[in-house]
Image (spheres, rainbow, N blue to C red):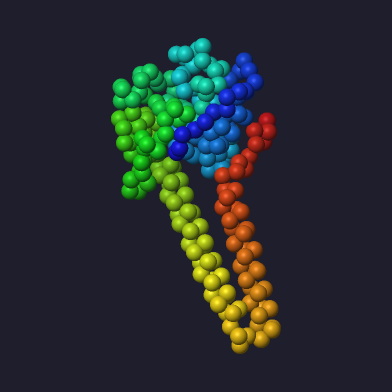
Amino acid sequence: MPLRTRRTSTPKHKAYQRYKPYLREDFAYACVYCGMHENEAGGPRFFTVEHFRPKSRFPQLATEYTNLLYACSVCNTYKSNDWPHDDPLAAGAGYLDPCEHDYDQHFGLAEAFVLIGHTAVARYMIDRLHLNRPMLQKLRRQRHEQAELHEQFVALFAQNMALLGEHLREAALTASQRRQLAKELERLRRQFERHVESWEKRWQPLYSLDDYR
């Protein structure tokens, strides 16, 4: 998961829950810790406003936007008010702010879609947040398989387009045959465009906060 960016300005609210709409957008509708997307979890009902520095220990930051994250309820529950150190990199224990640290430099993926830590603090987070719980491993596998199918479809489309193009260049074709091939070519193109559009929109949120009011 690459470095995240929070917006620099939001309306001021006395209740931290009011920041949820902004956090959803800033963190791409996904948990900042495990990466699960709202679409995979059933919507924003299963996500929370996460206090990076726990509000029970840092009450002055309870409504400070720079201390708020978007996390699934499971990761939020596992983290709770745990805060072992203010300098997690030096201590080798604690939590990395995804807006200050590129998680891709600290975490990697091993066989069986097991998340591994390249640094001590990453390994602490994996253990504390249970980032290799079976559901997450299953989701990583599904994403990988879906990406492979997408690549296969794109390759198959390119191959079929090339074959049809070769046929259309054959001088022996009748006018009727050319029309039929052109029609088939257009059908394939429309199918490909629908697939690409669906693939590019796969992470657009399927739910709104209003669905749960």
Residue 74, visible in the rendered structure: no
Query: For residue 17, which quarter of the picture?
Result: top right
Report x, y in % for residue 120: 30, 30
Q: Is residue 26 depicted above or below 82 in this figure?
A: below
Q: Quadrant of the C terminus?
A: top right
Name the residue: 68% across, 78% down. 179
Q: Which residue appears at 51% of the width and 15% of the height?
A: 61
Furthest residue toward bottom: 172
Can you tell which quarter of the image residue 12 is in? top right
Asked whether the viewer can see residue 178, the reply is: yes
Q: Tell whether 58 sits left or right of 184.
A: left
Q: Is residue 6 above or below residue 153?
A: above
- Quarter-wise, where is residue 115 in the image? top left
Q: Tell me if 155 is positioned left or right of 193 in this view.
A: left
The residue positioned farthest toward the top in the image shown: 60
Q: In the image, residue 77 lies at what x, y percent? A: 46, 27
The quadrant in which the N terminus is found is: top left
Name the residue: 36% across, 44% down. Answer: 109
Count the marks.
0
146 to 90, vertically: above or below: below
Q: Identify which residue, 46 or 1, lies in the foreground.
A: 1
Q: Is residue 43 left or right of residue 124?
A: right
Query: What residue appears at the point 54 percent right and 66 percent down from the top-left corner?
Result: 157
Relative side of 141 to 46, left or right: left
Q: Position of residue 20 (x, y in %)?
A: 59, 27
Q: Position of residue 21 (x, y in %)?
A: 62, 29
